[in-house]
Image (cartoon, helix red, strand yellow):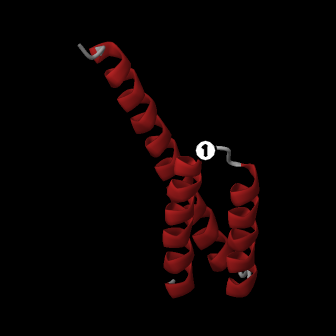
Amino acid sequence: MRDVSSANDADDDAAFAEGAITLWGNLLTLIGLQLLESGTAREDVLEMLTMLHETNQETLRSPRARASASRHLMSVYRALAEA
């Protein structure tokens, strides 16, 4: 028989991680928009996001977290590129 509490704990951990990454992505979008509105060149803001992506790829241990962060960061990149 499967341990239900272990399954729920794993799901809760995954939900927590996804929520944290989503919050991080939303915050990056707001910061990026503020930088653009205050006169920072779009290319500079996009370069900062590229550097953040490269850092994440090197430092996040979890492949799942890396993939999720990468997807969220790409969404931020696209939103700011079109803003």
| Res. 38 visible in picture | no
Image quadrant holding the N terminus, namely top left
Whether 82 is drawn above or below 23: the answer is below
- Residue 52 in percent (x, y) is at 72, 63
Q: Is residue 8 left or right of residue 79?
A: left
Q: In the image, is residue 37 above or below residue 32? A: below
Is residue 15 among what the camera can see? yes
Q: Is residue 82 above or below residue 6?
A: below
On the image, the x and y values in percent for residue 75 come to 48, 70
Q: Which residue is mark 1?
A: 62
Determine whether the residue tagged by mark 1 lies in a helix, strand or loop: loop
Left or right of 48 in this view: 10: left
Q: Nearer the viewer, residue 36 or 13?
A: 13
Residue drawn at (76%, 69%), measured in percent from left and top?
51
Residue located 32% across and 14% down the image: 5
Q: Depth check: 8 or 75 in front?
A: 8
Q: Please report the residue visible at 39 percent of the width from the left and 37 percent of the height from the top.
A: 15
Residue farthest to the front? 1
The residue nearer to you, when weighing 78 against 34, is 78
Quarter of the figure with residue 43: bottom right
Nearer to us in this view, 59 or 29: 59
- Image coordinates of residue 11 in percent, x first then y, are 36, 31
Numbered-mark total: 1
In the image, what residue type sits under mark 1?
A: Ser
Is disc 1 surrounded by few (<14), some (14 to 19) or many (20+) residues within 10 Å?
few
Q: Residue at x 32, y 23 (%)?
A: 8
Q: Position of residue 24 (x, y in %)?
A: 56, 51
